[in-house]
Image (cartoon, rainbow, N blue to C red):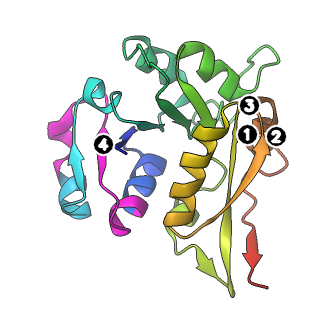
Amino acid sequence: MSISIIGAGAIGSAIARKFARNGIEVSIANSRGPETLQALVSELGPNAKAVTLKEAAQADIVFLAVNWDRIEGALKNLGPWDGRILVDANNAVEVPSYQPIDLGGRASSQAVAEWAPGARVVKAFNHLVAPVLEADPKVDGGRRVLFVAGEDADAKKAVSDLIVKVGYVSIDLGGLEQSRLVQFPGGPLAIVNLVQLNQ
């Protein structure tokens, strides 16, 4: 199963490092082109490569990790999605003020799903800050928790399997409506660093 990341900022780079260090091949793209990602892919080693946005969008699982004000534009020309999995690792927040974006009552992942018709959208990898996400998930005799939410059970399982493979515990919150629980700001689970202790 091919994996790509659109966005090479703090969260996108943290996800890329997590995968590459665990032997999972990943492609990375940004709006400025593959040539601007050479330092990052050199750091990550043989499991990472830089690609174009169009190439990244063709992966089986596509992680989306860009500033909220760029998401709709980034997705506009990347379809059709044909049932591929789109992992929404974003938060609907203005930068640098960190004020919430008014989405007319929708959860942020519901907006992403509207902008990427045909994609199976899963909310994940968004609720921890980048340094914590990049840190060792094994801590205090247990493992850090990452959450998933989405409408498609098979898509959630594929993302959950990746979460477990890189050392986390995966907890399913339900559908995209429940992704509000991990939205920043305002979600009660946003930036909450939970560890499931081994029994």
Q: Which residue is drawn at 54% across and 70% down?
A: 167
Q: Quadrant for residue 55, please give it.
A: top left
Q: Is residue 170 visible?
A: yes
Q: Which of marks 1 and 4 is nearer the N terminus?
A: 4
- Residue type beneath disc 3: Leu
- Residue type beneath disc 2: Gly
The x, y position of residue 116, in whole percent, is 52, 17
Would residue 124 be found to the left or right of residue 180 on screen? left
Q: Residue at x 45, y 54 (%)?
A: 15
For the residues marked 3 and 4, what is the alpha-carbon distance in whole angstroms?
A: 25 Å
Q: What element carries label 1?
A: loop
Residue for badge 1: 183
C-beta proximity under 8 Å, tags 2 and 1? yes
The C terminus: image quadrant: bottom right
Residue for badge 4: 28
Residue for badge 2: 186
Magenta stretch in the rendered image: 18-38
Disc nearest the viewer among 2 and 4 = 4
Residue for badge 3: 176
C-beta proximity under 8 Å, tags 3 and 2? no
* Camera-side residue of 169 and 190: 169
Residue 31 is a magenta residue:
yes
